């Protein structure tokens, strides 16, 4: 497991301040060129992660544990492919060429995440299908309906509206980065990592840890954009209200405390970006 005890990522050298400012740096984000440099050091190969021990251990897991992991992993199999596909219009919705480049880097991450979870579906979970699309079709049977709704209906509709100019990049970022990645993925990844602490599935654990590191900068990028876009108080309130709802898409597979953690983090991000007044002590 990656050790953050020093406060600095041992892979890319970044601190949380590089992506989400703290304390006296409230509302101050790194330059986009800094993101690009840090992201270059975060690159990894989804095909290089060894899943052989995981494949051996999977059939021997307790049935209830395997069922819970199946729901979580199948959900990410569906969701990561969706975010990979539907991030494409985001770069076209900005005139800032550097932002468009960093969004391209994010899409490269999302493609890698989709590849990792497809490998897990094929090699560890042994979902049927000759192609990734076949395996996603098989995975759908294990995914809660609210998650399917978010990633197969809500996100594609938003991407279509962004591509046509019906909504702006701020609205796209609010859903994609703040809610889907910042709440749904945060809750699901935290639940997965907790379920993998015993290292029975070391390859999946390594992969999810690396995905989690990537998501940190994705969320930071989205928050940086909102900090510059300055949404209204009403828009921020609507985003936070929706955070409560989307956290519940996991149902019982993610503990209530973990879902609440993701919602609390969403509030905290809005605050450190200067978009929400911090609570009175």
Image (spheres, rainbow, N blue to C red):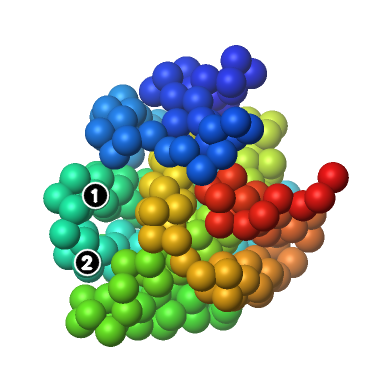
Q: Identify which residue is drawn at 32% across, 35% down.
A: 31
Is residue 235 depicted above or below 4 in this figure? below
Which quadrant, please, contains the N terminus? top right
Locate residue 111, reporting x and y percent: 28, 52
Q: Identify which residue is drawn at 39% across, 54% down.
A: 228
Is residue 212 depicted above or below 14 in this figure? below
Which quadrant, please, contains the C terminus? top right
Instruction: Report if residue 227 is visible in the image.
Output: yes
The mark found on residue 99 in the picture is 1
Give how far apart the Cα atoms at labels 1 and 2 are.
10 Å
Is residue 248 depicted above or below 56 in this figure? below
Q: Residue 66 vs residue 77: left or right?
A: right
The mark found on residue 265 in the picture is none
Q: Identify which residue is drawn at 58% across, 69% down.
A: 233
Q: Secondary structure at mark 1?
A: helix
Q: Residue 67 vs residue 213: left or right?
A: right
The mark found on residue 93 in the picture is 2
Is residue 123 depicted above or below 47 in this figure? below
Q: Identify which residue is drawn at 45% across, 31% down.
A: 18
Locate residue 125, reporting x and y percent: 49, 54
Locate residue 265, reporting x and y percent: 65, 50
């Amino acid at each position: 497991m990656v050790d953050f005890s020093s406060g600095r990522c041992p892979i890319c050298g970044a601190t949380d301040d590089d992506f989400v400012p703290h304390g006296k740096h409230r509302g101050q984000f790194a330059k986009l060129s800094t993101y690009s440099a840090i992201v270059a050091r975060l690159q990894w190969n989804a095909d290089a992660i060894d899943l052989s021990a995981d494949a051996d251990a999977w059939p021997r897991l307790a049935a209830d544990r395997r069922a819970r992991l199946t729901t979580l992993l199948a959900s990410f199999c569906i969701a990561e492919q969706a975010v990979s596909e539907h991030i494409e219009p985001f770069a076209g919705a900005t005139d800032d060429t550097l932002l468009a480049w960093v969004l391209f880097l994010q899409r490269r991450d999302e493609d890698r995440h989709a590849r990792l979870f497809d490998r897990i579906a094929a090699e560890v979970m042994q979902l049927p299908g000759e192609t990734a699309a076949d395996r996603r079709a098989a995975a759908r049977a294990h995914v809660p309906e609210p998650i399917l709704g978010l990633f197969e209906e809500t996100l594609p509709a938003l991407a279509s509206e962004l591509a046509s100019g019906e909504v702006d990049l701020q609205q796209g970022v609010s859903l994609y980065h703040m809610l889907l990645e910042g709440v749904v993925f945060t809750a699901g990844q935290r639940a997965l990592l907790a379920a993998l602490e015993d290292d029975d599935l070391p390859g999946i654990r390594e992969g999810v840890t690396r995905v989690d590191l990537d998501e940190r900068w994705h969320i930071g990028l989205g928050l940086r954009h909102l900090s510059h876009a300055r949404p209204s108080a009403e828009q921020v309130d609507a985003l936070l209200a929706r955070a409560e709802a989307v956290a519940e898409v996991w149902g019982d597979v993610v503990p209530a405390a973990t879902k609440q953690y993701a919602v609390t983090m969403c509030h905290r991000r809005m605050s450190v970006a200067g978009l929400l007044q911090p609570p009175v002590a």
